[in-house]
Image (tube, helix red, strand yellow):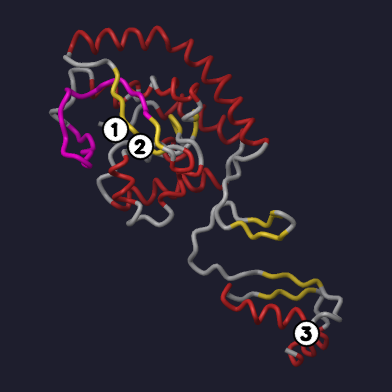
Amino acid sequence: MTRIAERISASGAAEVWICVPLEMGDTVHGLFYALRNHTEEIRLIPDFKDMRLLNHRTSEVAGHLAIDLSVSPISGMARLVKRAEDILLGGLITLMILPVCLLIALIIKMTSKGPVLFKQYRTGSNGKQFKVYKFRSMHVHQESEGVVTQATKGDSRLTPIGALLRKTSLDELPQFYNVLQGRMSIVGPRPHALAHNEYYKELVESYMRRHKVKPGITGWAQVNGLRGETETLEKMQRRVEYDLWYIDNWSLFLDIKIIFMTVFKGFTNKNAY
């Protein structure tokens, strides 16, 4: 350590960057002690190798320096801002779509047997489960326990207007009630079926970190074409990457941008069946 300190002095460097893996903590301590009489700026740049970081930064917790590896930027005042966005915009949109919702409910009731709404448990913020609401787009049927089969093109389970509802995302309008409940947000990662979460969490790195925020009616992945059926692992990996990018870069401006993109290009998609 003394030799390294001497080389730093001889180099005339203004800063010293200590770039080592986390397991070399003793080395960091020894080098920092060797430089105790030096005036250079000393910075620790840990090597996180292949770790998928989320909104990484430094913070202070109970008087201690913390290196945050996986945290959500939607906390504190940002959480209040996002909730205000959901209440104001969600309430306004709910009033605007109410006549459309009533018409869709009437058509569903007239064209197929069963309830108007489809209810299913999904994973919400911080892994808490909640009941999501959608207009029923399929005939009432029973699937095997723990199995959720994604809709495919020409799916025989679809009702007479089911395909149209799904392709235009009109089946998701009841989720504005979930938003007003505080269980969803207008913008966020789309909530997947519980069975899909159990399947993909072992195959896609950091998959469950998409649940660090409230799920959304629309999201960054959806307005970038990653909507509908995910029949390949690669498609799910891309969707998760977009979801994590959204969480890592959240801002009110980004939410508004996604909402506008949804209005102009996100309602219909060739991959939604």
View extreme (bottom): residue:
3
Alpha-carbon span between mark 3 and mark 2: 55 Å
* Residue type (three-letter) at the residue carrying disc 1: Ala
Q: Earlier in the sequence, mark 2 or mark 1?
A: 2
27 lies above or below 134: below
Q: Position of residue 3 (x, y in %)?
A: 75, 92
Please tell me which residue is depicted at 29% across the width and 26% down the height of the picture: 166
Circle 3/circle 2 CB separation < 8 Å: no
Secondary element type, mark 1: loop
Three-letter code, disc 3 = Ala
Identify the residue under disc 3.
34
Is 141 magenta? The answer is yes
Residue 238 screen position, x and y as percent: 39, 49
Decide: few, some or many residues near mark 2? Use Cα within 10 Å; few <14, some 14-19, many ≥20: many
Q: Which residue is mark 2?
A: 227
Q: Amino acid at mark 2?
A: Arg
Q: In 3D space, how far apart are the residues under numbered discs 2 and 1 (Cα atoms)?
A: 6 Å
Q: Quadrant of the N terminus?
A: bottom right
Q: Earlier in the sequence, mark 1 or mark 3?
A: 3
Per the rendered image, the range of residues in magenta is 131-153
Q: Which residue shows up at 48% across the image and 10% down it? A: 95
Q: How would you rate the neighbour count of disc 1 (Cα within 10 Å): few for under 14, some for 14-19, many for 20 or more?
A: many
Residue 118 lies in the magenta-colored region: no
Instruction: Determine which residue is flagged by label 1.
Output: 272
